Amino acid sequence: MKKIKQTFFGGSDTPKNGDGNCFQACVASILEIPLEGSFNHGVFSDDEWFEKFNDWLKQYGLASIFIECGPDNPMCSTPLRGIHIAEMETKESSLKHAVVIDSDKIIHDPMPYPSGKEYTCCGIYFFVPLDPRICRALV
């Protein structure tokens, strides 16, 4: 993994839709590609971006599934091996933030400066190989 930092942030300093590019930076980090070549969900509507993301991932032989975390979902309380993207939230803000995790540990926060905030995981974007024969290579 190549750690890449985000270049714009959610809220008023965001160019178009109020989202930062932390998710884009996480994808670029995991795939070890330039930020500019990474998937940018901010150019799609909330209804279409995840389908477009999976279409885009096909060029890397991957797909993604999203599992929402919560007290009723034991999947998120048991660490699963592998590198994934976690969708996080804080008590201070309604904005979501993406970080790279390995099992249940944050291994890369694309924020260029330490926020000092305590995050709670609200969902995980798992990467899944389209060819099951390469599953062992990803973990």
Image: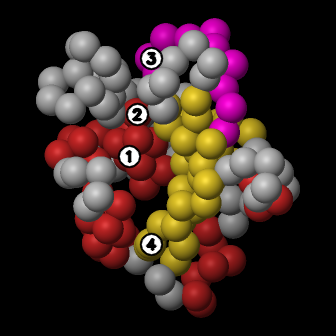
CB within 8 Å, label 3 to label 1: no
Q: Disc 1 designates what residue?
A: 28
Q: Give the amino acid type for the residue marked by disc 2 in the picture.
A: Cys
Q: Disc 4 designates what residue?
A: 63
Mark 2 or mark 1: which is in front? 2
Q: Disc 3 designates what residue?
A: 112
| Alpha carbon separation for disc pair 3 and 1 | 15 Å
Residue 61 shown left or right of residue 122 in the figure: left
Q: Disc 2 designates what residue?
A: 22
The residue positioned 29% from the left and 22% from the top of the image is 8
First in residue order: circle 3 vs circle 4: 4
The span shown in magenta is 111-121
Mark 3 or mark 4: which is in front? 4
Q: Label 1: how many residues lie within 10 Å, few (<14), some (14-19) or many (20+)? A: many
Secondary structure of the residue carrying numbered label 4: strand
Mark 4 or mark 1: which is in front? 4
First in residue order: circle 2 vs circle 1: 2
Q: Give the amino acid type for the residue marked by disc 1 in the picture.
A: Ala
| Alpha carbon separation for disc pair 2 and 4 | 19 Å
Q: Picture coordinates of residue 67 (x, y %)?
A: 61, 60
Prevailing secondary structure class for the magenta stretch in the rendered image: loop
First in residue order: circle 3 vs circle 2: 2
